[in-house]
Image (cartoon, grey):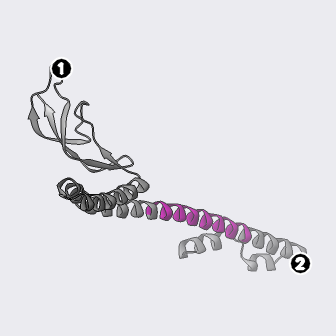
């Protein structure tokens, strides 16, 4: 309890000296009233402290969850170039044994991303969406394809509704 609250309580509580000039019964009633008033003040203070603590606990839990999600997203963002390189290694492998081994590592990483809720952004043939893709090239599409994604040059990824990396795409003129 801070100093201001203590002073406010002391001002509201009758002074025992006021009670001493009355009969013994009135003095006891006065002291009882004083004790009840003090009890009510402490009870109210305890309720406020409990509510403040619950609000703090809720805020702290939400902040912790947000920090966890941000950390997880950052790790995923930092490892996306590794995923790209493993995909390239599978495509570039000359012998079948090497290709199968690297493909197994790629599958493990993709399964881990799927477990964490990471999804790839591949919208080939769909209308260009600047909230998911960066148009880095324009090309000639079939009639009526204007504004549609022709080719995904680099995959994009999302974690829930959060875009971790925008897809780099070629868009029809």
**Relative to 127, residue 163 above or below:** below
Magenta segment, principal secondary structure? helix
Q: Is residue 168 left or right of residue 4?
A: left
Q: Which residues are magenta?
A: 39-63
The residue that disc 2 covers is: 24
How far across and how far down the image is residue 154, in percent?
Answer: 19, 48
**Relative to 143, residue 161 above or below:** below
How far across and how far down the image is residue 49, in percent?
Answer: 60, 67
Q: Is residue 131 left or right of residue 59?
A: left
Location of the C terminus (image quadrant): top left
Q: Secondary structure at mark 1?
A: loop
**Relative to 48, residue 18 above or below:** below
- Residue placed furthest toward the top: 143
How many C-alpha atoms fall within 10 Å of the one at disc 1: few (<14), some, or many (≥20)?
few
Between residue 62 and residue 102, name the one nearer to us. Answer: 102
The residue that disc 1 covers is: 144
Q: Secondary structure at mark 2?
A: helix
Location of the N terminus (image quadrant): bottom right
Q: Which mark is in front, 2 or 1?
A: 1
Q: Does residue 95 show up magenta in the picture?
A: no
Q: Is residue 142 left or right of residue 55?
A: left
Between residue 108 and residue 92, name the one nearer to us. Answer: 92
Question: What residue is shown at x 65% (from left), y 64% (from top)?
Answer: 47
């Amino acid at each position: 309890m801070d100093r201001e609250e203590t002073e406010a309580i002391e001002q509201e509580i009758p002074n025992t000296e006021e009670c001493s000039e009355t009969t013994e019964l009135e003095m006891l009633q006065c002291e009882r009233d004083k004790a009840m008033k003090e009890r009510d003040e402490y009870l109210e203070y305890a309720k406020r402290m409990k509510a403040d603590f619950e609000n703090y606990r809720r805020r702290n839990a939400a902040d912790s969850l947000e920090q966890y999600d941000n950390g997880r997203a950052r790790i995923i963002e930092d490892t996306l170039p590794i995923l790209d390189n493993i995909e390239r290694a599978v495509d570039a492998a000359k012998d079948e044994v090497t290709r199968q081994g690297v493909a197994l590592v790629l599958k493990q990483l993709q399964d881990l991303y799927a477990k964490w809720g990471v999804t790839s952004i591949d919208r080939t043939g769909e209308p260009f969406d600047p909230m998911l893709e960066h148009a880095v090239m324009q090309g000639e599409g079939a009639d009526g394809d204007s504004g549609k994604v022709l080719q995904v040059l680099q995959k994009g990824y999302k974690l829930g509704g959060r875009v971790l990396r925008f897809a780099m795409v070629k868009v029809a003129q």
